[in-house]
Image (tube, grey):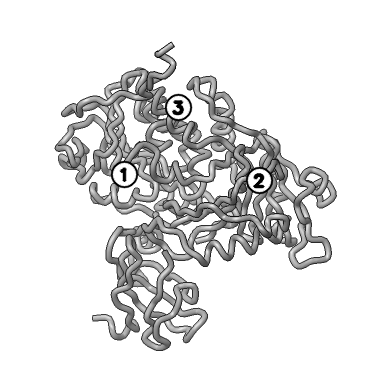
Amino acid sequence: MLQLFQKKRMWRKSPLKRHYDVIIVGAGVHGLATAYYLGKLGITNVAVLDKGYIGGGASARSTAILRANYLTSQGIPFFRESLKLYGDLAQELDYNMLFTRSGRFDLGHTESAVFGLRMRSQFNQMHGVDSRLIGPDEIKKLIPVLDIRQGKHLPVMAALYHPPGGVIRHDAVVWGYARGADRMGTEIHPFTEVIGIKKNDNKIIGVETTHGFISAGSVVSATAGWSSTVAALADVNLPIVTHPLQAFVTEPLKPYIDATISSANLHVYAYQTDRGEVVIGGGVNHYPSYSQRSTLDMLETLSGHVLELLPALRDVNVMRQWAGLCDMTPDYAPIMGKVDGLDDFFISCGWGTWGFKAAPIAGKCMAEMIFTGRVPELIQPFSLSRFREGKLVNERASAPAGAIH
Amino acid sequence: MAFLLNCPNCGERNVGEFRFGGELKVRPEPNSSRDAWTDYIYFHRNVAGDQSEWWYHSFGCRKWMVALRNTVTNEVKDVLFPEDVS
């Protein structure tokens, strides 16, 4: 009986060794997913280091929306595979993640926006992703509380309806991966900041941390908003600018809306959580910053716009507002792979505002790449070298709420 | 955290009046290699700390200016017209 009240640690605390086969910098969802899938391939002499606590950066600040309704022939299959992995993740990790496939609606209020949504629906169907264009009547039937704005400025003309999209409990995903990796023998070391990366000619040999030097066979950086600062330790410049992204939640309400809605024209997206709070987010700040403080102007703009779609929220109180850092790339697509001219250094970055939904497949592909030394086909289009080869992947149109920087 | 920029023309104004124009870099010569132009256009230092950067006062005097800002605290230390930058 007493055992019921005993706290079980989800992951061990172990002394830092002086050498690991793989060191992963960043204990967010990407770093931990990479560690977990490395473990499944039998690589467990691995340390995941973080300057803060587990999942305390972008993973904690993500609004946890999952979807695969992207635009490009490179992006759609990648996010499709991620959504598939998310579908089975609770079972795989034996951890309840409260994944709710409530359906995702990308609203179009102008002819050009509807054109973009129609294009996405066609490409989605070509790549086996369930998404289709629906008109205002069907939207109103599926989301009765939505103001479809007939006769008003920016009426809802159509929506890209993506039924398998939804929301997951983001902390659970992080903790599930952490526990899964720990059970296979991987070590997780929070509050161990990497302050230097040591090279021998063009080969990475280890990292300098706040707890001393650790040598490593390979080093992986999965540091999201701080990717540029970590890469700079290895004298690598990245095509990344760090912008804050803000969101806020209302007080809990009775079940009111069971869909995830997003509007690029109104720069706002919203959904109701299992606790009843309405989460409201939008585009990134228009200037780059590493500050994680929220701003009043963003709260005002987002509130104004969400009321244009969900007028019933008019008198509802706001409980919390926060900001997370997004590593934005010029083409709104991620960067995964090696850095040319540098051995045993892997980067997984450029996760901007689309990183959380990609974590399982990105972690799996990163692990496979480290294990085999070859780049999996699924992530070949997302190499760092694409910027030098003129092979950008333009996912701008599918960025959430038109998160244009 | 939002902040104010001290426009040399208009005085202290809210950041919402300005458009960010990227970190300050040396522009390559027109006939430079494609690699040099790729570096200039796509690759950034993206420092966490003091950064010299371009701003355009789009809802004000519509002049370009260079600010020295700490990107972690958003403290703006100096704003100058480009011709006054040493």
Where residue A305 sits in the image (x, y, percent)? 65, 62
Residue furthest top as drawn: A1
Question: In the displayed structure, would residue A22 be above or below residue A267?
Answer: above
> If you read the primary sequence from the N terminus, does the residue marked by circle 3 or circle 2 appear first?
3
Query: From mark 3 to mark 2, how far is it between C-alphas?
Result: 28 Å
The residue that mark 1 highlights is A340
Residue on which disc 3 sits: A176
Q: Compare residues A282 and A202 and report the one nearer the observer.
A: A282
Secondary structure of residue under mark 2: loop
Q: Is residue A332 above or below residue B6?
A: above
Write down the quadrant of residue A148 in the picture.
bottom right
Q: Residue at x 44, y 65 (%)?
A: A287
- At 35% from the left and 29% from the top, the residue drawn is A370
Label 3 sits on what residue type? Gly
Q: Please report whichever mark, 1 or 2, sits nearer to the chain's N-terminal start.
A: 2
Q: Label 1 crowding class (10 Å Cα cut-off): few <14, some 14-19, many 20+? A: few
- Residue tagged 2: A253
